[in-house]
Amino acid sequence: MARYIRSLIKLYEMTDPIRGAESEEDKLERARRAIELWWYLYGELLLWAQSQIAGYEFGRANPEIMEKLSKVFDREITVDSHILEYIGLGFSWNRVNYDDPVMEKMDELMEKYDAGLDDPATRFLIRELLMSRSANSSFWRFDLQFALYALNLGHVEDIVRPAPVRRQGNPVQLLQWKVQALQHVYFHVGKGMKKYRALQLVGDTLGQSTETLRSWEKCISGDDDLAMKLGAAKIAGELEADLDKHSIKEMIELYGAEYHRSTTDLEYACFALKSIRSTPLEKVREGLRSGRRARKSGT
């Protein structure tokens, strides 16, 4: 935990307005990095608490399974029982102790009962995890807590209501495929092709006009994360041979690196290269068709 705390203090000091204009350099990315580190620290300090509450919410949603577990472990399971923490730990990707016989037994039982957290229970869990009277973060937590509670009563608050925009099929799936298509465009540009030609090449294969692809690009440009994926595809085209030949560490030494959400642009380029190679335009075309046919989600 010490290294996370040291890094958080360092980031705090590096971005302190009292230092003037120099502390504004990369402040957004450093803020993102600080939030990411906080969740790692949360994972070290509070996984046990999250797991106890997750187990409790699971128990509330599955009383029949809790009765079976009580018989298996030959004890009454209360809201304070360690068994709830073991249940909650099962939902975490990482294990605290891989040799714990109780955890192994719990894994077997949960698999046997095919048990998990349903949506209402998950919403109750998140609401509990947001619980605090701290005023500094209340402006977003309180609204989200209330909205999650309201959803379980069948009411949709504005904060979780879908934006009133017209969408075809599954908008999330379609957006992902559009990004994949544009990554192919930027990859060709990175390899030296003129952009208008790359748009034509990709558009012809997909059965889309260049104007359509440009409209996709315009929509995506307002999203930092999606724009980074396009930029990464261009870098992948520029440095394809080196990315195949060198490790990321070696690439950073050769070219330097910028960061986005604590990941280097070269790492993003490596991800983009793998994605482009594993997702040819024919697969993107089928994905777009599937996304348009998909049932809409949301309320």
Image (cartoon, rainbow, N blue to C red):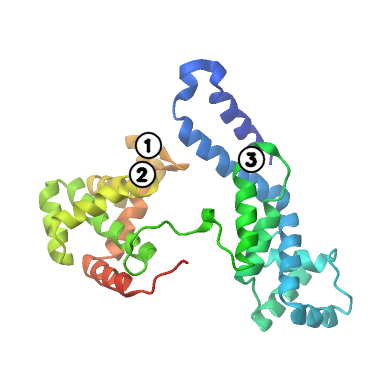
In this picture, is 78 found above or below 163?
below
Q: Are marks 1 and 2 in contact (CB under 8 Å)?
A: yes
The residue at the point 61 percent across, 50 percent down is 143
Q: Position of residue 53 (x, y in %)?
A: 74, 61
Residue 98 seen in render: no
Residue 159's mark?
A: none
Labels 3 and 2 touching (C-beta < 8 A): no
Give the residue number, with chain letter if any, for mark 2: 266
Three-letter amino acid code of the residue under disc 2: Leu
Does dot 1 land on a helix, a strand or a loop?
loop
- Mark 1 vs mark 2: which is more N-terminal? 1
Image quadrant of residue 251? top left
Sooner in the amino-acid sequence: mark 3 or mark 2: 3
User: In what element is the residue under mark 2?
Assistant: helix
Residue neighbourhood size for the residue with mark 1, other residues' Cα within 10 Å, grouped as few (<14), some (14–19), many (≥20): some
The N terminus, quarter of image: top right
Marking on residue 257: 1
Task: Single out the mark in the foreground, 3 or 2.
Answer: 3
* Residue displayed at 74% across by 69% down: 103
Quarter where residue 25 is shown: top left
| Residue 290 in the figure: left or right of residue 212 | right
Kind of residue sitting beneath label 1: Ala
Q: Categorize mark 3 by other alpha carbons within 10 Å: few (<14), some (14-19), many (20+).
A: few
- The residue pinned by badge 3 equals 137
